[in-house]
Structure formats: C-alpha cells, structure tokens
Amino acid sequence: MVLSGCNNNFVQNPTPIDPQGGFWDRYFVFPLSWLLDTAAEYLGGSYGLSILFTTIIIRLAVLPLMVKQLRSSRAMQIIQPELQKIKEKYKDNQQKAQEETMKLFQKHNVNPLAGCLPLFVQMPILIAFYQAIMRNESVRTHDFLWMSLGNPDPLYVLPIAAAITTFLQSKLMGTGMPQNPQMQMMLYIMPAMILFIAITLPSALSLYWVFGNIFTIIQTFFIKGNTPVPTQEVKK
C-alpha cells in the first residue's frame, strides 16, 4: 500500500540515484541499482534475469530471519490447542486470558511477534528496490518477454502469479491455521492485496515478488521437510 501511494510525478520524473547522496540513496537504493546493472552485464544484458539474480541474493541475505519466522509459525501452531483452551476457559475474563496466554508463551519460549520480523526487515528493501527500478533508466526502459519492466504488466500475468504464489507461500508456511480465524482470513486477504498493488506497479517489482515467492516456497519445503519441530522442542 505504501508503494502504491507513490505519486505520478515520481513515476514520470524519477530523481536520478546519487551514490554520494543521503543515507537512503547511498546505502539502500544505489547498492541495489548497482547490483542490477552488474548482474545484467554478466547475463547478456537481460534485466529480467538480473532481477532473478538480485532476488536470490536478497532472499539468501534474509534467510536466517525467514528460518526464524518459520520456526515461530510452527511453534505457534503447536501451542494452538492450549491457546484455544485458555480462550474458552477465560472467555469472560479477558485480563486473565491475556495473563495465561503470556505465561504459555514464556513457558514455551515463543514470541508471537517473531514471525513479523522478516516483514519489517524486507519492507525497506522492497521500497529501495522499487526506487532502484524506477530511478534506474536502464531497468525502467528494458523489455523482458512481453512486458516493459518499468510499466505494469499489460496482460496481468505477473500480478496474478504474484497473488497465487503469495497464497501458496502462506499456506505452506502454516499461516492459515484453522484454529485461528484471523490468520485464516489473512490467508486470502494478503494475495488479494498483492494482486491489487501489483496491477499498478512496474512489472519489475511484480517479477521480484514472483521470483521471491517461488524461492521461499522451495526454501520452506526443504526446511519443513528436514527440520521437524516436535512439541517437546518448542522450548529450544
């Protein structure tokens, strides 16, 4: 939603990236723009493939946080039956319910906010990546397959793919827990939001989302398959 609020003046007349400028340009936007340009040089001048390479680099950089998010999500699933019992037992006493819930979190060393950390870390990266695309003329004017990377996908293929892969990613990571109606709702709301936002943003950013989601789906599949978390290990 933050990205979709960028005004038309910025889209039509983006400010050139200043590598010696302020903190934001120097340490966020310029490094991503440089990485896109450098990767494209080694990939036959294709900025579509350059975005794929950059996506992999970014996702590997935040991999430890994603592993922590997955473990937190799985731990929350494990204690869901106990949370439900507390909710039912103290349905008429919200303060007591909150106290018992906090005790349960402390007992199992579970931080319910840990799953949000990757999102907060990735948001500035996503915004910087958006600016690296819009303020880099080479990327903005480059064509990849049927689309111009600086403009929205005219066929809506990428926005739809971004929404579908977001749903699959959330489903695989266990965010759609049947015991939690709010999270079950988010399982469907998030892909819808991604679809709406991706329709208005440059294809390059949608491409980043699709590549990133596919990477996360594969990564989550292997992590969940190779690192089971039995109930007794939630305390670790």
Image (cartoon, helix red, strand yellow):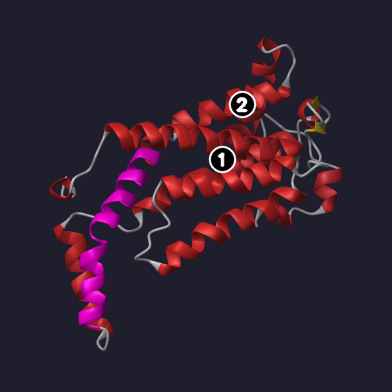
* Magenta run includes residue 40: no
Q: Foreground residue, 20 or 117?
A: 117
State how far apart marks 1 and 2 are (Cα).
Answer: 15 Å
Q: Specify the label residue 63 is tagged with.
A: none
| Residue 66 rendering spot, x and y as whole percentages | 40, 40
Residue 87 lies in the magenta stretch: yes
- Position above or below: 80 against 236: below
Q: Is residue 129 left or right of residue 166?
A: right
**Above-or-below relation of 209 to 77:** above
Front-most of residues 26 and 230: 230
> Disc 1 marks which residue?
125
Whether residue 203 is visible here, answered yes or no, is yes
The kind of residue on which mark 2 rests is Leu
Residue 37 sits in quarter: top right
Point 36% across, 46% down: residue: 69
Please name the residue shown 42% across and 32% down the image: 219
Residue nearest the observer in this picture, 174 or 75: 174
Foreground label between 1 and 2:
2
Q: Earlier in the sequence, mark 1 or mark 2?
A: 2
Image quarter of residue 184:
bottom left
Rate crowding at label 2 as few (under 14), some (14 to 19) or many (20 or more) other CA atoms within 10 Å.
many
Rendered view: 69 above or below 219: below
Residue 22 appears in view: no
Q: Amino acid at mark 1?
A: Ile
As helix, strand or loop, the secondary structure at mark 2 comes to helix
Q: Residue furthest bottom?
A: 92
Give left or right: position of 118 versus 78.
right
**Which quarter of the rendered picture does the N terminus lie within?**
bottom right
Segment colored magenta:
66-90
Residue annotated with mark 2: 52
Q: Residue at x 67, y 22 (%)?
A: 49
Name the dominant secondary structure of the magenta segment: helix
